Amino acid sequence: MTAATTPVIEVCELVKRYRKAARNAVDGVSFAVQPGEFFSLLGPNGAGKTTTISILTTTLRPTSGSVRIAGHDGVGDPAAVRRQIGIIFQRPSVDPSLSGEENVRFHAMLYGLFPYRPTYRMMPRAYRQQVEELAALLGIEQDIFKPVRTLSGGMTRKLEIIRGLMHRPQVLFLDEPTAGLDAASRHNLWDHLREVRRRGDTTVFLTTHYLEEAEQADRICIIDQGRVVSLGTPDELKADLLEEYLVLDADDRGALRRQLEALDLRVAHTGPFQVTLNGHSAQDVIRAIDGPLTMLRTHSPSLEDAYLRIIGATSE
């Protein structure tokens, strides 16, 4: 395997069992994430998402199994892993008594990126340039110098992203990054995150409750009861479980049913008819119908439909 195709995240048979627990919180989870990929981890509450991401970010040790991040052993060399990752937690982790830039400065010092200086102007030019570039990228050039306690939730999230990108991580972990933000702030934040990915070729690993955010991912891993229950692109998850269908109706329902059945289509309900396309295109079906329709609606499966089907199947 060449360096170009080596996964930046490799998880193999990961198990975590807490003391006195009746079952494993994570039970044999395996997946791989390619460099530059946008990968999303989904699952209901208690599915094992938080435990999994805690192990990947080295804040929790697994019971068994292996994790490699950017070529480093997550158990054997956690310090090396931490140097290669950035983390944006669900709950803000910045000091509200400091300015945004001061939070970034302390982070840069702790990572050994730059020597600490008591004021921004005294910091090395390379530091100031990097802060200015990231602040401009995320649209908080002026706000970054304000006390964190005066910033909105969206601005605070952007500040955390700047801090998390200062050491140029290969992987950016986003744990519910838009939780608590209004719809406009969520949309704005994702616009900026897409630009971050485009410019830096950063691998993004997301956990979220918002399925519309996960649908933007290159691939999605759904876990439930500690196990991987589905893995693939959003389109693959939808296509494997659900089919596009038409909802049709006519004044002469008997004639409409006969025409649909002549096309070997599965017809559900007594009317309006729900028609599974069974390999046909919607246009082909409509063209084959002789007579006026009183209803015509196309239903394309959503990620939410697929997710609910997957989770429902595992809980039965």
Image (tube, rainbow, N blue to C red):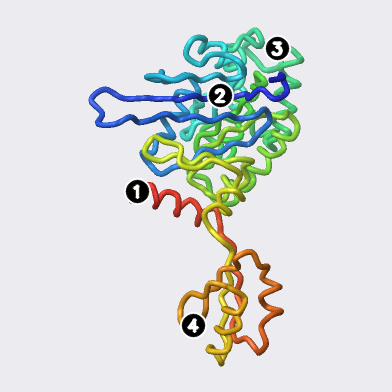
Q: Are marks 2 and 4 in contact (CB under 8 Å)?
A: no
What type is the residue that disc 3 sits on? Met
Q: Assign a secondary structure to mark 2.
A: strand
Secondary structure under tag 1 reads: helix
Marks 1/3 in contact by CB < 8 Å: the verdict is no
Report if residue 31 is visible in the image. yes
Residue type at numbered disc 4: Gly
**Disc 1 from disc 3: Cα separation:** 58 Å
Lower position in the chain sequence, tag 4 or tag 3: 3
x and y percent of residue 291 in the render? Answer: 66, 89
Residue at 49%, 27% (x, y): give it: 93
Residue highlighted by disc 1: 315
Q: To which residue does mark 4 refer?
A: 271
Residue pointed to by mark 2: 10
Dot 4 lies on which element? loop
For the N terminus, the quadrant is top right
From this view, report whether residue 303 is shown above or below residue 126. below
Most foreground residue, 14 or 78:
14
Residue 19, x across and y down, in percent: 26, 22
User: Reading the chain from its start, which is encountered first: label 1 or label 2?
Assistant: 2
Above or below residue 296? Residue 72 is above
Instruction: Tell me if I can see residue 163 in this picture.
Output: no
